[in-house]
Image (cartoon, grey):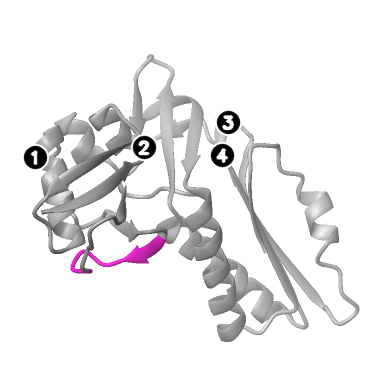
């Protein structure tokens, strides 16, 4: 299951949803907002998403992960809106019978989410400027 | 000529100054629609790292467009 939300992410509560008597392993990933990117001091981030396709593509990624690395349960939550330094922007959790599937599925899911979901982030810098991440060429043409 | 609704996101929205617009253009593929919007809004972003969807389904740049379609233009994504 994948969820897009403007509310703060609570990894502890989410992790509990993955408990399963058949699970011998759990692997979780949290992506946090850090205060620097490519040499620029970051003040906060703004996430924008197109939810209908982020959700459908996210479910496709989870299904692919399950096919490749059979796990018991996997959840993903991604924030949108304005986030401050230290906030959790994305959480992925996987429970599986053994650690290999949990690690590999978690890694696959977060890696694919980052490159496939229609989500964009705008960095607001300490010096007052802002910029869309990965969009240098269109920024130059603006 | 086809009537195509184009939706812009993130940097594309800021560059165009609007969320969406309806264009009447000669366009066979999604790439043709993108090209028309780049000309219209003086954007130089190549298709390479951008993605496109037609009527809420992910598509390829050479996917055909039909009269009445909604084409969604996604600049390079950066989730996580």
Q: Which residue is mark 2?
A: B10
Percent across and percent down for residue A83 are 58, 31
Q: Which residue is mark 3?
A: A83
Outermost residue, right side: A21
- Residue at the location (21% across, 64% down)? B61
- Mark 3 touching mark 4, by CB under 8 A? no
Q: Give the extent of the magenta segment.
A: B57-63
From this view, report whether residue A109 is shown above or below residue A78. below
Are dots 3 and 2 on a single chain? no
Disc 2 and disc 1 in contact, CB within 8 angstroms: no
Please give the residue where the numbered disc 1 appears in the rendered image.
Answer: B39
Q: In the image shown, does A16 or A62 lie closer to the viewer?
A: A62
Q: Which residue is mark 4?
A: A80
Residue A63 in the figure: left or right of residue A75: left
What element does badge 3 sit on?
strand
Spatial CA distance of label 2 from label 4 is 12 Å
Residue A77, percent across and down? 65, 52
The answer to whether the residue labelled 2 contacts the one labelled 4, judged by CB atoms less than 8 Å apart, is no
Determine the chain carrying the residue at label 3.
A
From the viewer's perspective, is the residue at label 4 or at label 1 nearer?
A: 1
Where residue A21 sits: x, y (%)? 91, 78
Q: Is residue B68 above or below residue B61?
A: above
- On the picture, is A29 further left or further right than A120? right
Quarter-of-image position of residue B39? top left
Pointer 4 chain: A
Nearest to N terminus: mark 2 or mark 1: 2
Q: Are marks 4 and 1 in contact (CB under 8 Å)?
A: no
Mark 1 element type: helix
Q: CA distance from mark 2 to mark 1?
A: 18 Å
């Amino acid at each position: 299951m994948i969820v897009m939300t403007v509310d703060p992410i609570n990894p502890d509560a989410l992790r509990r949803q993955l408990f399963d008597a058949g699970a011998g392993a759990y692997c979780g990933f949290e992506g946090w907002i850090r205060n620097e990117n490519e040499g620029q001091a970051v003040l906060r981030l703004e996430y924008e998403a197109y939810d209908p396709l982020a959700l459908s593509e996210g479910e496709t990624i989870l299904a692919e992960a399950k096919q490749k690395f059979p796990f018991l349960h996997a959840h993903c939550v991604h924030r949108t809106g304005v986030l401050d330094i230290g906030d959790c922007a994305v959480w992925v959790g996987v429970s599986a019978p053994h650690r290999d599937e949990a690690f590999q599925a978690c890694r696959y899911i977060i890696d694919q989410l980052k490159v496939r979901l229609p989500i964009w982030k705008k960095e607001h810098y300490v010096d007052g400027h802002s910029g869309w991440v990965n969009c240098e060429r269109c920024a130059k043409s603006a | 000529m086809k009537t195509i609704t184009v939706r812009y996101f993130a940097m594309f929205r800021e560059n165009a100054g609007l969320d969406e617009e309806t264009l009447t253009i000669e366009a066979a593929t999604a790439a043709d629609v993108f090209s028309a919007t780049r000309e219209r809004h003086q954007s130089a972003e190549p298709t390479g790292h951008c993605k496109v969807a037609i009527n809420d389904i992910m598509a390829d740049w050479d996917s055909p467009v039909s009269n009445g379609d909604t084409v969604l233009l996604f600049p390079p994504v950066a989730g996580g």
